[in-house]
Protein backbone atom coordinates (compact mmCIF):
# COMPACT_ATOMS: atom_id res chain seq x y z
CA UNK A 1 0.00 0.00 0.00
CA UNK A 2 1.08 3.55 -0.70
CA UNK A 3 2.56 5.44 2.28
CA UNK A 4 1.38 9.03 2.91
CA UNK A 5 4.42 10.88 1.56
CA UNK A 6 6.12 11.77 -1.73
CA UNK A 7 9.81 11.88 -2.72
CA UNK A 8 11.77 13.93 -5.27
CA UNK A 9 15.24 12.89 -6.46
CA UNK A 10 17.60 15.06 -8.50
CA UNK A 11 20.43 13.17 -10.22
CA UNK A 12 23.61 15.21 -10.62
CA UNK A 13 27.05 14.71 -12.08
CA UNK A 14 30.24 16.62 -11.31
CA UNK A 15 32.22 17.59 -14.40
CA UNK A 16 35.36 19.64 -15.00
CA UNK A 17 33.25 22.62 -16.09
CA UNK A 18 30.81 22.35 -13.17
CA UNK A 19 27.78 20.41 -11.98
CA UNK A 20 24.97 19.23 -14.24
CA UNK A 21 21.51 18.18 -13.08
CA UNK A 22 18.95 15.91 -14.71
CA UNK A 23 15.19 16.37 -15.02
CA UNK A 24 12.47 14.30 -16.66
CA UNK A 25 9.46 15.18 -18.82
CA UNK A 26 6.31 13.49 -17.57
CA UNK A 27 4.36 11.64 -20.22
CA UNK A 28 0.94 12.38 -18.72
CA UNK A 29 1.30 16.09 -17.84
CA UNK A 30 4.10 17.06 -20.23
CA UNK A 31 5.97 19.01 -17.54
CA UNK A 32 9.59 18.80 -16.34
CA UNK A 33 10.38 17.53 -12.85
CA UNK A 34 12.81 15.50 -10.78
CA UNK A 35 12.34 11.76 -10.34
CA UNK A 36 9.24 11.55 -8.15
CA UNK A 37 7.00 9.03 -6.53
CA UNK A 38 5.40 7.79 -3.38
CA UNK A 39 6.68 5.67 -0.59
CA UNK A 40 5.39 2.20 0.05
CA UNK A 41 4.13 1.06 3.43
CA UNK A 42 7.06 0.32 5.78
CA UNK A 43 9.57 2.12 3.54
CA UNK A 44 11.61 5.11 4.74
CA UNK A 45 11.78 8.20 2.50
CA UNK A 46 15.41 7.32 1.65
CA UNK A 47 14.43 3.78 0.68
CA UNK A 48 11.60 5.19 -1.46
CA UNK A 49 14.00 7.67 -3.11
CA UNK A 50 16.42 4.86 -4.00
CA UNK A 51 13.63 2.64 -5.34
CA UNK A 52 12.06 5.43 -7.41
CA UNK A 53 15.46 6.46 -8.85
CA UNK A 54 16.11 2.84 -9.82
CA UNK A 55 12.63 2.33 -11.30
CA UNK A 56 12.40 5.61 -13.21
CA UNK A 57 16.01 6.28 -14.23
CA UNK A 58 17.90 3.02 -13.64
CA UNK A 59 20.14 4.71 -11.05
CA UNK A 60 21.84 2.10 -8.86
CA UNK A 61 20.70 2.10 -5.23
CA UNK A 62 24.36 1.94 -4.15
CA UNK A 63 24.96 5.48 -5.47
CA UNK A 64 25.45 8.32 -3.00
CA UNK A 65 22.01 9.73 -2.04
CA UNK A 66 21.76 12.86 0.11
CA UNK A 67 18.57 14.02 1.83
CA UNK A 68 17.94 17.74 1.51
CA UNK A 69 16.26 20.01 4.08
CA UNK A 70 13.66 21.14 1.53
CA UNK A 71 10.20 19.71 2.05
CA UNK A 72 6.80 20.65 0.71
CA UNK A 73 3.19 19.79 1.45
CA UNK A 74 1.29 18.24 -1.43
CA UNK A 75 -2.55 18.15 -1.55
CA UNK A 76 -3.73 14.54 -1.57
CA UNK A 77 -6.04 15.29 -4.51
CA UNK A 78 -2.92 15.96 -6.62
CA UNK A 79 -1.53 12.51 -5.76
CA UNK A 80 -4.06 9.75 -5.16
CA UNK A 81 -7.07 11.41 -3.57
CA UNK A 82 -8.24 10.57 -0.09
CA UNK A 83 -6.43 7.24 0.01
CA UNK A 84 -5.49 7.71 3.68
CA UNK A 85 -8.92 8.86 4.88
CA UNK A 86 -10.90 12.09 4.91
CA UNK A 87 -8.65 13.70 7.55
CA UNK A 88 -5.38 13.43 5.59
CA UNK A 89 -5.48 16.50 3.36
CA UNK A 90 -1.78 16.99 2.55
CA UNK A 91 1.27 14.76 2.57
CA UNK A 92 4.95 15.70 2.92
CA UNK A 93 7.33 15.66 -0.01
CA UNK A 94 10.95 14.79 0.90
CA UNK A 95 13.80 15.71 -1.42
CA UNK A 96 17.13 14.10 -2.32
CA UNK A 97 20.13 14.48 -4.57
CA UNK A 98 21.97 11.49 -6.01
CA UNK A 99 25.39 11.56 -7.61
CA UNK A 100 25.81 9.58 -10.81
CA UNK A 101 28.90 8.66 -12.84
CA UNK A 102 27.35 8.85 -16.29
CA UNK A 103 24.76 11.06 -18.02
CA UNK A 104 23.18 8.00 -19.65
CA UNK A 105 19.82 7.46 -17.95
CA UNK A 106 17.51 4.48 -18.39
CA UNK A 107 14.19 6.15 -19.24
CA UNK A 108 11.01 4.34 -18.15
CA UNK A 109 7.35 4.57 -19.22
CA UNK A 110 6.44 7.54 -17.00
CA UNK A 111 8.65 9.97 -18.95
CA UNK A 112 9.14 10.84 -22.60
CA UNK A 113 12.63 12.33 -22.26
CA UNK A 114 15.28 13.54 -19.88
CA UNK A 115 17.55 16.57 -19.99
CA UNK A 116 20.90 17.44 -18.40
CA UNK A 117 22.01 20.99 -17.82
CA UNK A 118 23.41 23.60 -15.50
CA UNK A 119 21.45 24.80 -12.49
CA UNK A 120 20.18 27.82 -14.43
CA UNK A 121 19.14 25.79 -17.50
CA UNK A 122 17.34 23.15 -15.44
CA UNK A 123 15.71 25.50 -12.94
CA UNK A 124 13.95 27.50 -15.65
CA UNK A 125 12.32 24.34 -17.06
CA UNK A 126 10.87 23.04 -13.78
CA UNK A 127 7.11 23.31 -13.33
CA UNK A 128 6.65 23.23 -9.54
CA UNK A 129 8.11 25.49 -6.87
CA UNK A 130 8.97 22.51 -4.64
CA UNK A 131 11.25 21.18 -7.38
CA UNK A 132 12.84 24.61 -7.87
CA UNK A 133 13.48 25.01 -4.14
CA UNK A 134 15.00 21.55 -3.79
CA UNK A 135 17.23 22.11 -6.83
CA UNK A 136 18.34 25.48 -5.43
CA UNK A 137 19.27 23.85 -2.11
CA UNK A 138 21.12 20.98 -3.80
CA UNK A 139 23.04 23.38 -6.05
CA UNK A 140 23.93 25.63 -3.12
CA UNK A 141 25.14 22.69 -1.02
CA UNK A 142 27.21 21.27 -3.87
CA UNK A 143 28.80 24.56 -4.95
CA UNK A 144 29.55 25.57 -1.35
CA UNK A 145 30.70 22.04 -0.39
CA UNK A 146 28.01 21.75 2.29
CA UNK A 147 26.63 18.25 1.78
CA UNK A 148 26.76 17.51 5.51
Image (cartoon, helix red, strand yellow):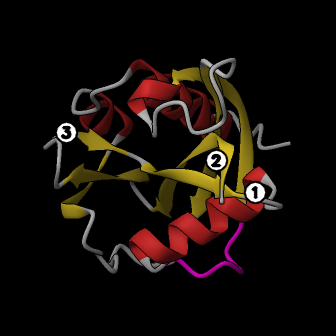
- Within 10 Å of the Cα at label 2, are there few (<14), some (14-19), or many (20+) other Cα atoms? many
- Within 10 Å of the Cα at label 1, are there few (<14), some (14-19), or many (20+) other Cα atoms? some
Q: Against 78, is 37 above or below?
A: below
SS at badge 2: strand
- Depth check, mark 1 against mark 2: the one in front is 1
Given contact means CB atoms under 8 Å apart, are the residues at marks 1 and 3 in contact?
Answer: no
Taking the spot 57% from the left edge, 51% from the top edge, the residue there is: 38
* Residue at the spot of label 1: 46
State the CA–CA distance, disc 1 to disc 2: 8 Å
* Residue at the spot of label 3: 31
Q: Quadrant of residue 88?
A: top right
Mark positioned earlier in the residue sequence (2 or 3): 3
* Residue at the spot of label 2: 96
The magenta-colored residue range is 59-64
**Figure disc tally:** 3
Taking the spot 59% from the left edge, 37% from the top edge, the residue there is: 138
Q: Against 130, is 66 above or below?
A: below
In the figure, is residue 111 to the left or right of 36?
A: left
Given contact means CB atoms under 8 Å apart, are the residues at marks 2 and 3 in contact?
Answer: no
The prevailing secondary structure element of the residues shown in magenta is loop
Give the x, y percent position of residue 123: 32, 30
Given contact means CB atoms under 8 Å apart, are the residues at marks 1 and 2 in contact?
Answer: yes
In the figure, is residue 5 to the left or right of 20?
A: right
Give the x, y percent position of residue 117: 28, 49
- Depth check, mark 2 against mark 3: the one in front is 3
Give the x, y percent position of residue 32: 24, 42
Mark positioned earlier in the residue sequence (1 or 3): 3
Amino acid sequence: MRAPYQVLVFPYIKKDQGINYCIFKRKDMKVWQAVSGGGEEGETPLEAAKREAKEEANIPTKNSFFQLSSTASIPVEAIRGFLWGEDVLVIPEYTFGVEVDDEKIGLKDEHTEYKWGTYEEISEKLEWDSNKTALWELNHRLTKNKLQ
